[in-house]
Amino acid sequence: MPRRPTPIPSLLLLLLHSTSAQPPDPLSCVNCVGNGKKCIGDPSVQAINDEDCVLCLKSSSKWTWPCNVEGLCWCWDTSKPKFKPTVPSGLEVSTKKPCEVFTKKMFDEIAPNAVEPYTYEGLCDTIDMLNERYDEKLFQMGSVDQQKNEWAAFVGHTTHESAQYTAAREALFAHGRWSWGSGTYCKPCANENFDWADRYCEVSLVSNGQMYEEYCDKTVTPPFGCVCGPTTEVESNGNLAGLMNPNFVYFGRGALQLSWNANYLKASQVLAESADTLCSQPELVATDPTYAWGTALWFWNFNRPPGDETTCHIQSLTGSFGGSLNIINGGLECPAHPNSYHADAIVTRLRYYCIAATVIGVKRLLSFDGCDGLAQKFEDCNLSGMCPECNEWMMLAEVDSDMPTKMPSPLLPTQRPTIWRSWANEDWMSEIKRRDSSAVGLSNFLGLLTCLVTSYVLLGNGGLECPAHPNNYHADAIVTRLPFPWFTATVTGVKGLLSFDRCDGLAQKFEDCNLSGICALAEVDSDMPT
């Protein structure tokens, strides 16, 4: 019997990271002399001339402007292109290329319905482009296990944000896109007016002369952010009434839904070497693979919380999925407000992360610390049956110090579903968005659910699930139904689950579900699980 690897607490990982031999900080101008090195200023942070940064060559000046402003002055090796480096991990560069670790087969299994601009080739090309520029490599630092961990975290976040690489634009804008003449136009919609079932909105936010200025911080102007301001419909009458030019608005686009005028400019400087490219053509993020992937990679490797020397890239390498989520959406999901959209949406994020971790083959999930409430959400999600993709990470293993570890049973090898779409797809995400305003707490129906599950299968869906036809949706869907009576029975304290008779094949499905590791373990005795 193989021994389960001992989980390494994320605190220890961070300690090892911080105490191991670190290379010189490429952002520091201290001792930036000789060998073609030059201390220069970054005008995208503050208005500054390179001459102002000469003061920063001395360590004694660290409390004096401009040296006391993080990242304002940095050390440039003039023998290389002038690309400002990101936060270093201190790890060695792996000899294994990123797309040798994350293969096309893995990509297709995780996102079988991916559409343009989300191509695997575009992802790999954009990573290669950025890794040629910078010493700190995306998905190529440290051991192969660390490469896999970073890939799983990135893919988990981006498949959630982009609905498995099928949504290039924020849904409230993408639903109504019209091509007219040589232009493309969009119809902005308020969440309360949007029909998530039909993906349609009757009421435009720019109709009848209304002005739209979401995602626009007018106090941020070049070189700190794209110029933005109120915009309205292209025409008050005719075919373009209620429509606006999407290139005037900085709403969510791309694999991590880049938004706000400041972020578009910063990403443009890194990806296009010009602030104007994405400021004048933000739609490139929704149409060009270089920018659809590149903006997500820019955020992943360059975006730092104010006053904190870390990135999503660093968090995933040092063992924290929660830390990466806190950078991406911490204000809304760490923790998520009860009964809100984000309380439900975080479930899909966890499911996608588990899918990516399983397909990519990580040894353990990263820690959930760094994001308040995430570890508890993961446990609740598994116990309620809402995260079947995560069962093999929790149901057959302990969650130790927020570090979930997959431990296959020595007697019962785990099996996972081969079709993910039945559990993790855009329709499911749309459903939780529609029911957000009328969410009901689980505690209100736990006891009733225990009694009703079996009879519901028989009376409500027996024609499809008693028994379910092999290899179809209902054969998978019945697996998601089974954890609910187990969970509610545990919470409400019943002595045993109700019988599975009166539904052909259900008892066998329950046993198979447990033996495969997809459901919690229990004995099945004469159709009466206890």
Image: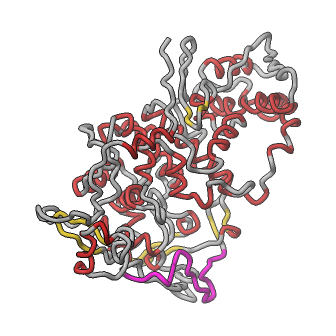
78 and 139: which is toward the camera: 78
**Foreground pick, 327 / 155:** 327
User: Measuring 68% from the left and 57% from the top, which residue is drawn there?
Assistant: 341
Judged left or right of residue 298, residue 244 is right
In front of the other: 281 or 216: 216
Give how far across and how far down residue 20 sits, in percent. Answer: 35, 42
- The residue shown at (54%, 48%) is 322
Give above or below for 42 relative to 347: below
Tell me where residue 495 sits by quadrant.
top right
The reply, left or right, for residue 2 in relation to residue 58 is: right
- Quarter of the image with the C terminus is top right
Q: What is the span of residues highlighted in magenta in the rendered image?
A: 203-222
In the image, is residue 220 above or below residue 467?
A: below
Can residue 429 be seen by looking at this rendering? yes
Quadrant position of residue 302? bottom left
Q: Up-down: is 311 above or below 46? A: above
Seen from the viewer's position, the closer of residues 480 and 222 is 222
